[in-house]
Amino acid sequence: MSETQTITELARDFGVTTRAIRYWESHGLVSPAREGGNRVYSKRDQARLKLALRGKRLGLSLAEIKDLIDMYDKARDESSQLLSFLDVLAQRRAALEQQRNDIQAVLKEIARFERQCRELLRSEEARPEANRRRRKPSR
């Protein structure tokens, strides 16, 4: 990447839309300079966008992403940012593990319902033909 980029170049390089970049700009994640009517993004903006996209992939909120990135700008050393990031990651991990547990519980419930339906179908097929005709569902 070059020292500066236009919004179109930045969008192309990061695989996002210019609209997304303008949205992140409106929330203070990037702060481009202006050359005429064009936005010009510095290396700092490029790095912040890269970090924002990583945070987004992790499922972090925009506020969490901004807090972590802003902390990086203010920190004299990285330890406070890293500790905060570890805390955010632990919270995200816990949420994802809970979702996984919830999904596993729902999958077990689905399997139970499938077994019940198959058993009902087998018992229906095992009944004599005369009984099956008599018990047609009403519509």
Image: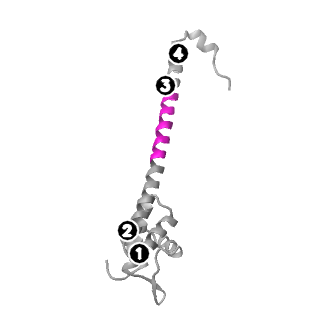
Q: How is the image coloured?
A: one colour
Mark 1 → mark 4, Cα distance in angstroms: 70 Å
Q: Which residue is mark 1?
A: 75
> What amino acid is labelled 4 in the image?
Ser
- Report x, y in % for residue 13: 36, 72
| Secondary structure category for the residue under label 3 | helix
Q: Residue at x 44, y 64 (%)?
A: 84
Tag in front: 4 or 3: 3
The vertical placement of 3 against 60, above or below, is below
64 left or right of 79 in image: right
The answer to whether marks 2 and 1 mark residues whose Cβ atoms lie closer than 8 Å is yes
In the rendered structure, find residue 92 and report the number of the disc placed on it: none
Mark 2 → mark 1, Cα distance in angstroms: 8 Å
What residue span does the magenta drawing correspond to? 97-115
Quadrant where the image shows the N terminus: bottom left
Mark 4 → mark 3, Cα distance in angstroms: 12 Å
